[in-house]
Amino acid sequence: MRRTTIRLLVILAAISIIGIVVTQTYWFKQAFNTETERFDREVNTALYHVAQSFFKLTDAEPANNPIKQLSTNYYVVMINNEIDAGLLEHLLRSEFEKRNISADFEYGIYDCTSDKMVYGSYVSMTPDRPVSSTTMLPKWKNQNYYFGVQFPNKASFITDRMGIWIFSSTVLFTVVIFFAYALFVILKQKRLSEIQKDFVNNMTHEFKTPIATIALSTDVLKDPSIVEQPERLRNYAMIIENENLRLKHQVERVLQMANLNKHEISLKSELVNVHHIIEDTQKSMMLGLGEKGGDIICQLEAENAEIMGDRLHLTNVVFNLIDNAIKYCATNPTVMISTHNENGRVFIEVKDNGIGISKQHQTKIFDQFFRVPTGNIHDVKGFGLGLNYVKIVTRAHKGTIEVCSEPDRGSTFEISFLNVK
């Protein structure tokens, strides 16, 4: 599938998810507002009947509009006479039960004689529900007799009435989450597929050269006259041996990374001097480096260079860092290796004058199979396994690794390990 097609599908999927979420949120809010209006109507009707009952019992003159809603959950009812708290609670409970209003409420009575709000009580409409703590109801700027009713749990009561909406929203959001996760997995698999394709291409390229060289050498050795030229025979035999060894190393490298992915890395810990490892690796690589006119400079200043670790794996770590410094260089490569001690650790710094690494690639260089684009350099070989191996081995030794690089200004890799005290 083309990259543009994938991008279009992702955009359309994102728009669809956002549209579904926005639509559901809008309708949920509309449903909540409808339930709130319904609740207010029911409460106003119930309070109106309570007021009418008081007017009939006390022969008080009914007010034109006795009910006022002062806030979202606070209502006051004007009564032109003294109010009996016991009768008020009975009437409120009866009227609310008739209209299936099971929300807990608290009521208070304003006393004109004392000019203060006399707190009534907190009424729980659900027997099993514990009574919550309450506070004095606010006083209303009115000198008439009135009582106030407040619903402290109004929002939760309305939400409980919207059971089907909550269920459908939960199901919808669950589907959206799984859809988004599936989309993430698809994109991840697409990326892994591209990485796998690049790896196969790189591996094919790496294997084709030695295989072609071996095939060419065997064709020469088929010539019967080669027996009369022992020096030439020996040279071609050496070529076959070297190319065979090269293939063996490549296969072992791939198998080694496969074992590391299965967490089968086995460290043979021993006392290791990192200076000796650096010096030995420098000597072995200087032979091939001379052809490129490059150099490896060592400034080993660490006073304590001994650590506990696996000599073979640590040697491979240093080898990979130097090898990358050489491969990713457009001019004569110069590699600077330095060491120092700090806070009980030995730091190894490998600095080069190569093509550098951009910020966007620095977070990926330690990923398996990832290879930094080399621009005009097309002869860089490898599987994209080296730095991933370096990271795994460094962490297995409880070490750290950091990179500092800028395009066209080289790269600096710094690893550190705990010293042996």
Image (cartoon, rainbow, N blue to C red):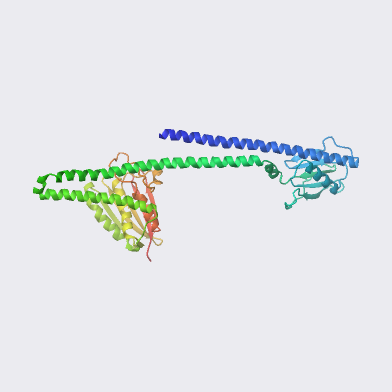
Residue 399 visible somewhere in the drawing: no
Q: Examine the rendered structure and indicate whether residue 177 appears above or below residue 399.
A: above
Q: Is 282 displayed left or right of 66 in the figure?
A: left
Q: Examine the rendered structure and indicate whether residue 301 appears above or below residue 79.
A: below
Q: Is 60 displayed left or right of 338 in the figure?
A: right
Q: Is 149 displayed left or right of 267 in the figure?
A: right
Displayed quadrant of residue 57: top right
Q: Quadrant of the C terminus?
A: bottom left
Q: Examine the rendered structure and indicate whether residue 26 appears above or below residue 239.
A: above
Foreground pick, 271 / 291: 271
Displayed quadrant of residue 395: bottom left
Q: Examine the rendered structure and indicate whether residue 1 appears above or below residue 101.
A: above
Foreground pick, 153 / 252: 252
Q: Position of residue 193 (x, y in %)?
A: 39, 41
Displayed quadrant of residue 312: bottom left
Q: Quadrant of the N terminus?
A: top left
Foreground pick, 40 / 199: 199
| Residue with the most extreme left position | 228
Q: Position of residue 89 (x, y in %)?
A: 82, 47
**Residue at 37% across / 63% down in the picture?**
419
Q: Position of residue 198 (x, y in %)?
A: 34, 41
**Residue at 71% across / 46% down in the picture?**
153
**Residue at 84% across / 40% down in the picture?**
51
Residue 258 visible somewhere in the drawing: yes
Q: Position of residue 370 (x, y in %)?
A: 37, 45
